[in-house]
Image (cartoon, rainbow, N blue to C red):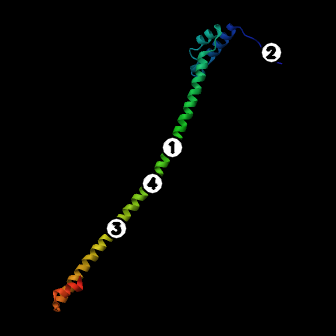
C-alpha cells in the first residue's frame, strides 16, 4: 500500500513555485501559469480555493461551449449555403428554360406573322383575280370575308 505524505502549506507553495520555475519559458504551461505563484500562495495560506485555476476551468468550459455553438453555426451556415446553391441552380435552370421558351415563342410569332402576310397577299391576289374576272365587289366580299 502506498504511503501518503502530507505537505505543509509552505511545502506545497515551494513545490508549486519550483514546478512553475522549472517550466521552459516558451511552453504553454509557463505562459498559462505566469504570474500565478503569488495568487496560489495567497490562496493556500488563506485556505481558499485557487480562484485563478477555478476561473480558468470555468472560462475553458465556457469557451468549449462557445466553440461548440460556433461549430454548429458553421454547420448550419454551410448547410444553408448548400441549400441556397441548389435553389440558385434550380432558378438558373428555370431561367434558361424560360429564355428557350421565349425564343421559341418569338420564332412562332415570326412564323405566324409571315403566315398572316402570306394569307393577306393571297387574299389580295384572289380579290384582284376576281375583279379581273368581272365579279362584282359585293360577291367578292362575300367570298373572301
**Residue at image location 59% in from the left, 27% down from the top:** 61
Q: CA distance from mark 4 to mark 1?
A: 16 Å
- Local packing at callout 2 (Cα closer than 10 Å; few below 14, some 14-19, many 20+) is few
Q: Earlier in the sequence, mark 4 or mark 2?
A: 2
Tag 2, which secondary structure? loop
Mark 2 sits on what residue? 3
* In this rendering, the label closer to the viewer, 2 or 3: 3
Q: Earlier in the sequence, mark 4 or mark 3?
A: 4
Tell whether 96 sits left or right of 16: left
Tag 1, which secondary structure? helix
* In this rendering, the label closer to the viewer, 1 or 2: 1
Mark 1 sits on what residue? 78
Q: Are marks 1 and 2 in contact (CB under 8 Å)?
A: no
- Local packing at callout 3 (Cα closer than 10 Å; few below 14, some 14-19, many 20+) is few
Q: CA distance from mark 3 to mark 1?
A: 40 Å
Mark 3 sits on what residue? 105
90 vs 20: above or below: below
* In this rendering, the label closer to the viewer, 4 or 2: 4
Tag 3, which secondary structure? helix
**Residue at image location 52% in from the left, 41% down from the top:** 76
Q: CA distance from mark 1 to mark 2?
A: 56 Å
**Can I make out residue 60 in this image?**
yes
Tag 4, which secondary structure? helix
The image position of residue 115, as x and y in percent, is 28, 77
Tell whether 102 sits left or right of 27: left
Mark 4 sits on what residue? 89
Q: Are marks 2 and 3 in contact (CB under 8 Å)?
A: no
- Local packing at callout 1 (Cα closer than 10 Å; few below 14, some 14-19, many 20+) is few
Amino acid at each position: 500500500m502506498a504511503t501518503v505524505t502530507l505537505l505543509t502549506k509552505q511545502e506545497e507553495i515551494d513545490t508549486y513555485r519550483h514546478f512553475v520555475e522549472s517550466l521552459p519559458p516558451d511552453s504553454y504551461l509557463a505562459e498559462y501559469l505566469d504570474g500565478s505563484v503569488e495568487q496560489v500562495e495567497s490562496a493556500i495560506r488563506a485556505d481558499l480555493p485557487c480562484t485563478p485555476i477555478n476561473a480558468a476551468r470555468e472560462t475553458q468550459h465556457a469557451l468549449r461551449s462557445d466553440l461548440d455553438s460556433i461549430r454548429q453555426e458553421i454547420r448550419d451556415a454551410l448547410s444553408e449555403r448548400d441549400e441556397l446553391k441548389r435553389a440558385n441552380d434550380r432558378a438558373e435552370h428555370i431561367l434558361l428554360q424560360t429564355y428557350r421558351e421565349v425564343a421559341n415563342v418569338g420564332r412562332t410569332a415570326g412564323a405566324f406573322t409571315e403566315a398572316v402576310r402570306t394569307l393577306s397577299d393571297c387574299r389580295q391576289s384572289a380579290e384582284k383575280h376576281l375583279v379581273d374576272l368581272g365579279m362584282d365587289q359585293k360577291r367578292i366580299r362575300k367570298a373572301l370575308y
